[in-house]
């Protein structure tokens, strides 16, 4: 008779652990403009990061995130290239652009 409550308790504990792992704060969520240090003030595009997707240059795709402190790895499901982003502060992030190899700046858009 004690096996049922013990199994229920273990199941609830595993479920709680799994849900906590998915609730890790992601400082990247929101809308950002993209600019390059080569052309200050020129907006190259807009990124929007949501819980399980991102929109960039008018295309939306499903993504997964790996967050370690201020470093966020964005892994698009359809594209094998991950985006390495470091959040500098609440309104600024740096993207190591995998295409050009250069560093570009993301600035948070407030609505």
Image: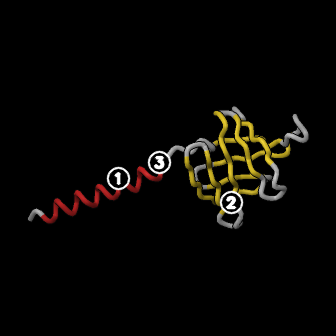
- Tell me which residue sits at (70%, 67%) in the image: 80
Q: Secondary structure at mark 1?
A: helix
- Can residue 5 be seen here? The reply is yes
Q: Residues within 10 Å of mark 1 (few under 14, many from 20)?
A: few
Q: Earlier in the sequence, mark 2 or mark 3?
A: 3
**Side of 53 where 13 appears, left or right:** left
Separation (CA) of disc 3 from disc 1: 11 Å
Residue 68 drawn at (x, y percent) = 55, 48
- Tell me which residue sits at (91%, 39%) in the image: 39
Residue 88 drawn at (x, y percent) = 67, 37
In the displayed orientation, state which residue is furthest to the right.
39
On residue 82, the disc is: 2
Q: Secondary structure at mark 2?
A: loop
Residue 55 drawn at (x, y percent) = 72, 52
Q: Dot 3 corresponds to which residue?
A: 23
**Side of 83 where 104 appears, left or right:** right
Seen from the viewer's position, the closer of residues 16 and 98 is 98
């Amino acid at each position: 008779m004690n096996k049922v409550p013990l199994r229920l308790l273990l199941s609830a504990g595993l479920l709680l652990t799994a849900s906590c792992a998915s609730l890790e704060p992601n400082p990247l969520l929101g809308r950002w403009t993209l600019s390059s240090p080569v052309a200050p003030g020129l907006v190259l595009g807009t990124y929007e990061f949501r819980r399980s997707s991102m929109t960039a240059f008018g295309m939306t795709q499903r993504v997964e995130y790996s967050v370690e402190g201020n470093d966020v790895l964005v892994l698009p499901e359809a594209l094998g290239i991950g985006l390495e982003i470091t959040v500098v502060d609440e309104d600024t992030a740096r993207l190591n652009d995998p295409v050009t190899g250069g560093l570009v700046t993301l600035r948070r858009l407030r609505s």
